[in-house]
Amino acid sequence: ELKVEQNPLFLSMQEGKNYTIYCNYSTTSDRLYWYRQDPGKSLESLFVLLSNGAVKQEGRLMASLDTKARLSTLHITAAVHDLSATYFCAVGSISNFGNEKLTFGTGTRLTIIP
Amino acid sequence: EAQVTQNPRYLITVTGKKLTVTCSQNMNHEYMSWYRQDPGLGLRQIYYSMNVEVTDKGDVPEGYKVSRKEKRNFPLILESPSPNQTSLYFCASSLWGGPRGNQPQHFGDGTRLSIL
């Protein structure tokens, strides 16, 4: 059974600082997704990572995937208040029927302090 | 506007009273899915559907039913709701869901269910 662990679960950081959120998963997969959720809102897709060594960047966020280590990271550079949200990673696995099943991590609640 | 629409957004009901949460997407997506979100547990997949008349169980299917009679609709049915089904539910869709996939899922705004 695929398990996905995110660390840390809660993160408070000052504006302007850098930090990294980690997503570890237990079985082989080369399909990893990052989502953002604002309080009381739905989930918004941030990144899709589909191969070992994939790196994607959007603004102050950069995501990477190491399939051999079964690890993805979401790096935040020079944090700003607007990045306060809960971030989820999700790992894709293909079922016996050929469908993709997503297993989500528990999320990292990020709070940026002025 | 491309969107996934869920109804109702909020519902308070009692144990045992059958309910249906509707989900509709206007993007001609083949893949649709239901999740529940609970504090400390992240999102857990309930059921998903590859296409019309093709559905499969996710991680927590007990107590739920789904149907996919039309491509755009994927209702979630609770035949006999119980308090442990109190949760925030999300419907999602993507263009494909399989080896041809690699598309992010588009999520609805969520349905908050309270079962008393």
Image: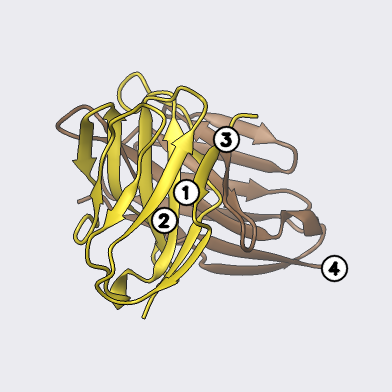
Chain colours: A brown, B yellow
Q: Identify residue for label 1.
A: A89
Q: Nearer the viewer, residue B97 or A113?
A: B97
Q: Residues within 10 Å of mark 4 (few under 14, many from 20)?
A: few
Q: Quadrant of residue B84?
A: bottom left
Side of A71 relative to B65 (left or right): right
- Tell whether B4 sits left or right of B32: right
Residue type (three-letter) at the residue carrying disc 1: Cys
Looking at the rendered structure, which numbered label has been put on residue A105? 2
Q: Which residue of the protein is positioned furthest toward the left in this rendering?
A: A96
The chain that hosts pointer 1 is: A
Q: Which residue is mark 4?
A: A114
Identify the element where label 3 is drawn: loop
Residue A62, given in percent of the width and then of the height, sits at 63, 40
Do the numbered discs 4 and 3 sit on residues whose CB atoms are within 8 Å? no
| Quadrant showing the C terminus of chain B | bottom left
Q: Which residue was labeled with disc 3?
A: B3
Occupied quadrant, residue B101: top left
Name the kind of residue labelled 4 in the image.
Answer: Pro
